[in-house]
Image (cartoon, rainbow, N blue to C red):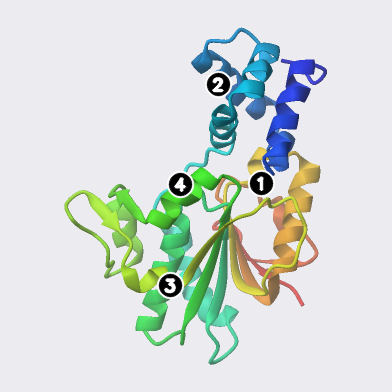
Amino acid sequence: MTATDPGLDRVRRHLAATGAASLCRFKARYLERRLQSRCRHRGVADLAAYADLLDHDPEEVGRLVSAVALGVTSFFRNPSAWRRLASLLPTAVSAGQPCHAWSAACATGEEAWSLALLLQDQVRAARLPGWEVDATDLDPRNLVVARHGEYPLRGRADIDAVLAFAPGIGPPGRFIVPEALRASVRFAVTDLTVPGPRGPYDVVLCRNVLMYFDAETQREVMDVVLSAVRPGGLVMLGKAELAGFDLFPRLESVDRPERIYRRAA
């Protein structure tokens, strides 16, 4: 696969037609691996043949979006970052106001529900009066799972490392999101490379997404994120992101190892 491969151009047009244009801007090496995997899975020899398949199989277009947008996620991934975020939350919210948070690129929802559980725990401890979470992802299939809110219980140790009490555990081997959380979490399909009115949010999580994009697209996504968080609000990136994001003039590093930043005024 090369940048001038006509089959690649046709595949990109299919991705763009789904509203997932940002997938075309993933780093070439990553995109190549995902496309080669789909070609092998469908038994086609090259991208031209795969593009022919996409022309006649709309369901494969959806499968391709899911394959390229695949995100690795779990409840309270990197617990130390979540514990640090919990300690900082009261400083990010105006006194007496509920916390408005955004889980960007939430994948199948574990991060969004983790954020909801953390904020509810803050309310229980009387550190916040209330909260609401917007959760977005590029892949509609991910959001079907997220809205359903039922998962195999993996990473129990990570949950226990952050929360003393975690409602939703059970029946055995399952995690079911409590009904009390559902009304305060809203899911929507969103492309992070497309500017638009969002927020203002007190907290934005954009974790392990930027690493898939080239430097120019990373800057565009960060502009979208920074436009959505209010001055004084917090931005948490993923451990896999480059620490150089503390060079953004509108970001002040709060905890560089945990990739937590504050939006400057």
- What's the distance in space between the residues labelled 3 and 2, CA to CA? 37 Å
Name the side, left or right, on which 228 lies relative to 178.
right
User: Residue 143: percent from the left, percent from the top?
Assistant: 49, 51
Q: Are marks 1 and 3 in contact (CB under 8 Å)?
A: no
Dot 2: element: helix
Tell me the amino acid under the disc marked 1.
Answer: Leu
Q: Quadrant of the N terminus?
A: top right
Residue 234: mark in rendering:
none
Q: Which residue is mark 2?
A: 38
In this rendering, which labeled residue sits more in front, label 2 or label 4? 2
Q: Which residue is mark 1?
A: 210
Tell me the amino acid under the disc marked 4.
Answer: Thr
Disc on the earlier residue, 1 or 4: 4
- What's the distance in space between the residues labelled 4 and 3, CA to CA? 22 Å
Q: Which residue is mark 3?
A: 183
Disc on the earlier residue, 3 or 2: 2
| Residue 26 visible in the snapshot | no
